[in-house]
Image (cartoon, helix red, strand yellow):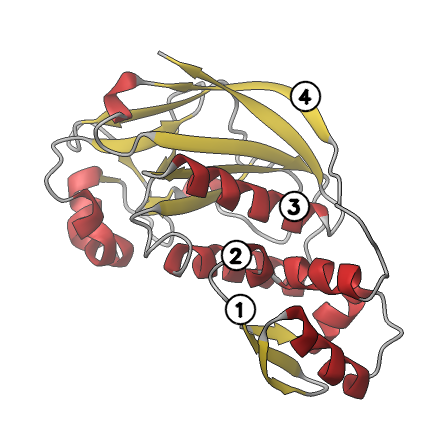
Amino acid sequence: MLYAHSIYFNLLGGGYTIDELRDKIPMLGVDMESISEEKIVVEVFPNRPDMLSVEGFARALKGFLDIETGLVEYKIHDSGAVLFVDGSVEDVRPYIACGIIKGVKFDEGSLVSLMDLQEKLHVTHGRNRKKVAIGVHDMNNSGIKPPFKYLAARPEDISFVPLDMSEELNLTEILRKHPKGVEFAHVLEGFDRCPVILDAEERVLSFPPIINGELTRVTGDTKDLFIEVTGNDKRAVEQALNIVVTSIADRGGEIYGVGLEHN
């Protein structure tokens, strides 16, 4: 894993030289490949997916260095939001966990860090999205509203503008035309329905595990996030959500819970 040194050092709170970190970091049980003024490169083992983010790695090192000891506790506020889980997803992609983060203050480094964490979790913890896939959505600029809905639909019945495109496509077309659709279509191979996440006005937020909608693109102006994690392993899904929301909370965001109701 590669961490920009300036971002990492700021999260750690300062007070340590490069030489001191070079001595301390391997004591966490990771292999450090290199450290410099520009970057820190380490190998994180599969049993610590929380350390895939720069925030999680800094959190672990703070504990080791006695900067912040004990189990970190995060307050979870009640958002009042609900996501309805339709029984149609049971055979396709049965598990989902979600949350809301408010008061996010992105800069270029933290936004890149979030997207980087998402992809690292997809590749490792998520087994290339088959086991777990994560969707991160802008709430304040997109205008999306709860209650949300998670269901499996016939691919020709749902259309939306996928991320990085300007053309509205149905789900079959996305699997054939969008780069992410082509890359990950095999995950949904053999199913006659595809999972989608909708908001209260039936707008498409996500076609997991393939692509989000352009509607909820996250930018530097995003202040509130809706985060959803889907997959076929309940524990892995919940772990991924916890990793993402706590990483954002470590940068000042506030965590809000989203209730699940199964139809």
Q: Which mark is residue 78?
A: 4
Question: Which residue corresponds to the image point at 40% horizontal and 35% vertical from the top-left?
Answer: 234
**Is disc 4 in contact with disc 3, using a CB cutoff of under 8 Å?**
no
Q: In the rendered view, does 238 fall on the left or right side of 155? A: right
Q: Earlier in the sequence, mark 4 or mark 3?
A: 4
Question: Which residue corresponds to the image point at 40% horizontal and 55% vertical from the top-left?
Answer: 122
Question: Which residue corresponds to the image point at 20% horizontal and 56% vertical from the top-left?
Answer: 182
Residue 188 horizontal/vertical position (percent): 19, 43
Residue 106 horizontal/vertical position (percent): 68, 54
The residue pinned by badge 2 equals 49
Q: Of residues 160 and 250, which is closer to you in this image?
A: 250
The residue pinned by badge 1 equals 44
- What kind of residue is marked 2? Pro
- Which tag is nearer the camera, tag 2 or tag 3? 2
Q: Of residues 147 and 24, which is closer to you in this image?
A: 24
- Which tag is nearer the camera, tag 1 or tag 3? 1
Q: Gap between marks 4 and 1, in whole Å?
A: 33 Å
**Is disc 1 in contact with disc 2, using a CB cutoff of under 8 Å?**
yes
Residue 244 horizontal/vertical position (percent): 57, 47
